Image (spheres, rainbow, N blue to C red):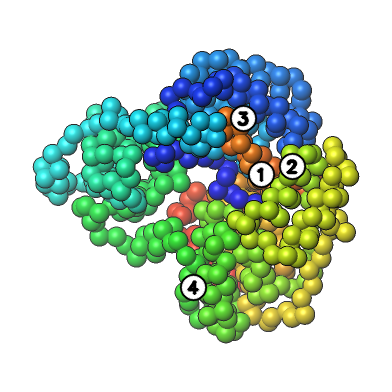
Amino acid sequence: MKFKFLVLVLMMLGLGIFNSYAQSCNCEENFNWVKKTFEENDAGFQYALSVKGKQAYEDHNKRILEKIKTAKTLNECAPILYEWLEFFRSGHIAIRLTNQNSNNTNQAAVATNSVNYDNWETLKVNLPEFEKYLANKKEQDLEGIWVTEPYKIGIKKVKNDYIGFIIESGADTWKKDQIKLKITHKNNKLYSTFYMRDHSAVESDKVEPFGKNTLQLGNTALKRVYPKLEEDKDIKAYSRIIEARKPFMEKLDDKTIYIRIPSFNVSSKKDIDSVLNLHRATILKTENLILDIRYGTGGSDSSFGEIIPFIYTNPIRTVGVEYYSTKLNNQRMLDFISKPEYGFDEDDKKWAKKAYDTLEKHLGTFMSLNKYPVSEERLDTVHEYPKNVGIIINKNNGSTDEQFLLAAKQSKKVKLFGTTTHGVLDISNMYFVPSPCKEFELGYALSRSKRIPDFPIDEIGIQPDFYIDGSIPKYKWVEFVKDVLNNK
């Protein structure tokens, strides 16, 4: 379950944008392929249809088809294809562009080499004069020089808006003076447009300055490097939290330990386990434990496996999933066996072959690959400490993050703090298949949870036990949780 696939993935990263479609793959034909493939294979298609209704689906198709007919390039077409997918759910869907074209490699190479953004909008600013102007400002705002790797960006106020221009770029798709972001005022609210490496636009209504030197635009964080303003202690601590790329632990007081876990990606498992092992003795003799998983990425269930023994009190029940069996879907089991990148050992491959054989016997139906519909995890030890566990969550937690929370909530020690999670867990196990002309991949889901329809998470999320309302600044959430745990 990969939360990082919740958004449209435009993997053009300097690889090239096709200005016209190869052979006969125009936007309408690509749409027809996406629609047919998704309808016939996605594990959540029929469920979404039953919830939203056939008429709503037909109206959606008609509206999207009108947009499809206006798209002349793949870059114009891809966002519309993704918009069509969003009818079904907000996560575990993707349109992932690629520069690979198996039918005509030379043609793909020509398209790649011809790509440039020399005509992109620019804002030319005299940098020494701009720095002098910034240094002499009596009141600081969003104007300044900011960094978000691999870019150094100047933000200058132009009329009522803020325009971000490239000062230095570590990406060959961006050049000096080109406009990288815009922050605009609409109805007394700030909105941002941030242009990605491939120049695709990501819009957000979340423009959040944290203190004086951190600026959050949607999921993108920028750090002010000039003029560097003196920051208070709480803001510095919060900046460290949201900028962390690896887990860390610190002791807040004699009764409370804090552990930050930025991601449950499979690549993070080693780092998470290392922090837990290094501080095991301290954790097991301290009364309160705070786990902060805000702004998570999802990832792999194995990444949170070593956390469970610290917070366990009673058997943890996990409701299983059913796989939708089709010829295309079942191919993934063969991929597990034949493709080294999955890293399956011989036992794993035997499981995949057995699963494939089972699924092939039940085409067109949902099948469980586990003997029992619900699994139960029992551990031999219930640790005296920590006695109280607070897990901090927000809207950015989904998929594997939510699977962890469903398990953690079954402990008598655990309470959730923050806001409702994203809600992307019921339809999962993504699979990517190439389009007919190999210009993009469609990402859809192979399984659905047996929790639905009785206990859905998608589009609803998991609610906290302690809601942290907007009157409490985000940089004070940890302190709030600490105070609640200490008063128990």
Query: Is residue 359 found left or right of 384 in the rendered image?
Result: right
Q: Earlier in the sequence, mark 2 or mark 4?
A: 4
The mark closer to the camera, 2 or 3, is 3
In whole angstroms, how far apart are the C-alphas of marks 2 and 4? 41 Å
Crowding around mark 4 (Cα neighbors within 10 Å: few <14, some 14 to 19, many 20+) is: some
Whether residue 18 is visible to the viewer of this picture, yes or no, is: yes
The answer to which of marks 3 and 4 sits earlier in the sequence is 4
Q: Name the residue under label 4.
A: 249
Q: What element carries label 2?
A: helix
Q: Position of residue 448 (x, y in %)?
A: 76, 45
x and y, in percent, of residue 82 in the image? 57, 31
Left or right of 263: which side holds 60?
A: right
Of the two numbered discs 3 and 1 in the rendering, the one whose residue sits closer to the viewer: 3
Point out the tag, 1 or 2, that comes first from the N-terminus. 2
Which of the two labelled residues, at mark 3 and mark 1, occupies the earlier sequence position? 1
Asked whether 389 or 78 is in front, the reply is: 78
Pointer 2 residue? 329
Q: Nearer the viewer, residue 370 or 153?
A: 370
Q: Where is residue 361 in the image (x, y as percent from the top left)?
A: 89, 45
Q: Distance between the residues labelled 1 and 2?
A: 8 Å
- Mark 3 and mark 4 in contact? Answer it, CB < 8 Å: no
The reply, left or right, for residue 15 in relation to residue 275 is left
| Amino acid type, residue under disc 2 in the picture | Asn
- Return the disc, 2 or 3, that comes first in the chain's sequence: 2
- Residue 395: tell me if it is visible: no
Which image quarter holds the C terminus? Answer: bottom right
Q: Residue at x 32, y 32 (%)?
A: 116
List the residue tagged with mark 3.
436
Q: Amino acid type of disc 3? A: Pro
Task: Determine the secondary structure under disc 4.
Answer: strand
What residue is shown with label 1? 431
